[in-house]
Amino acid sequence: MNPTVSPDELADMLEQVRQLVRRDVVPREREIADADAIPADLLAKAKAMGLFGYAIDQEWGGLGLDLVQEVELAMELGYTSLAFRSMFGTNNGIAGQVLVNFGTDVQKATWLERIAGGDVVASFALTESGAGSNPAGLRTRAVRVDDGWSITGEKRFITNAPLAALFMVFARVDAEEGDQIAVFLVPGDTAGVTVGPHDRKMGQEGAWTADVHLDDVRVPDDALVGGAVDVGYRAAMTSLAKGRVHIAALAVGQAQRALDESVAYAATATQGGTPIGDFQLVQAMLADQQVGVLAGRSLVRDTARRFVSGEDRRIGPSAAKLYCTEMAGRVADLAVQVHGGSGYMRDSTVERIYRDVRLLRLYEGTSEIQRLIIGSNLLREQRRNA
């Protein structure tokens, strides 16, 4: 049990977020998609509720949720446009956790309070053209110079890059032990940092990603996270593992929304004067959706509990992300099928969900990478125990 946030405090927080999502964000999902942006007043409400720092310790101005509590929040946030959560997701997740877990005391004091308060948007600059789900393929390089480090390379699909005031830049470094992956704190206004226009994607309009170009970007020694060149790979893997459980919870939230939309439509739409929900094959589709949602929710909660206890921080996160994101895709597909031709129309909620959830199987490690992580770790455990 997390002593920082009591069950009563968590329940109150979840109710406030549920109200924000369902009363304020859901009615404006079409506005978000059409404008490809989150309205400023919704971001202000998220900021006022502390959502930019829900997973950051209270000593740094955050809400201090552990992962068991965080997944409950994520399932609520996942009920609406995923772009809304994306705006503050990197502050709490893959970017913010680099500092939380590996930053020096000075680095934390310099940045975490501003990140938790939403005054700084942080971005996780890992992915490259030749290094997506596997950071071992990084080509961005950092070399020592007299006054610190020079970083050169290109990053792709970097979430919140057009808005970021701080980048966690992962780069390869020549060290005595051989190549190491280091991570650097690079303010967005540093000379040599160029952010491209935000990408046009299949879905998740309003969640901005872009290329980031680094041309002889100079940063001081104290920009090296943790003060050591071997921190980067561990920081990436740790942040991604935790983030995968969060993504799994978001997938459950989206699947629940798709199910709710399907049930509501089946109960009211008619075919030949008969509600389509009376047809057994439609009921079967609803049943398959419900089973997937229930199984996914249970898996996420169990995985989060085992992560927090330290029992499993390898196989579980990958298994949860693999199952829940694939499940959300199946539930969204069934939702379109239940709606028939109406579900294929651009103004349909389930059409948007169908496109939005497709990305969940790609970022923070594709489904294929998750299978490799699960399989290789099962074999590693067997050999260790043999």
Image (tube, rainbow, N blue to C red):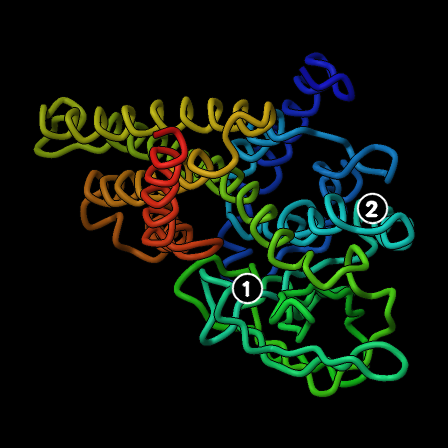
Image-quadrant location for residue 209 = bottom right
What residue did someone put label 2 on? 117
For the residue pair 331 and 7, the one nearer the viewer reads as 7
**Could you say where residue 134 lies in the image, as x and y percent from the top left?**
46, 62
Image coordinates of residue 291 in percent, x first then y, are: 27, 24
Q: Secondary structure at mark 2?
A: loop
What residue is shown with label 1?
36
Count of number-bearing discs = 2
Vertical comparison of 142 with 209: above or below: below
Q: Secondary structure at mark 1?
A: loop
Q: Position of residue 378 (x, y in %)?
A: 35, 37
Q: Is residue 249 visible?
A: yes
- Residue drawn at the location 72% of the way across and 64% of the way down: 229
| Disc 2 residue type (three-letter) | Gly
Is 62 on the left-hand or right-hand side of 51?
right
Give the amino acid type for the residue marked by disc 1 in the picture: Asp
Dot 1 crowding, Cα within 10 Å, few <14, some 14–19, many 20+: some
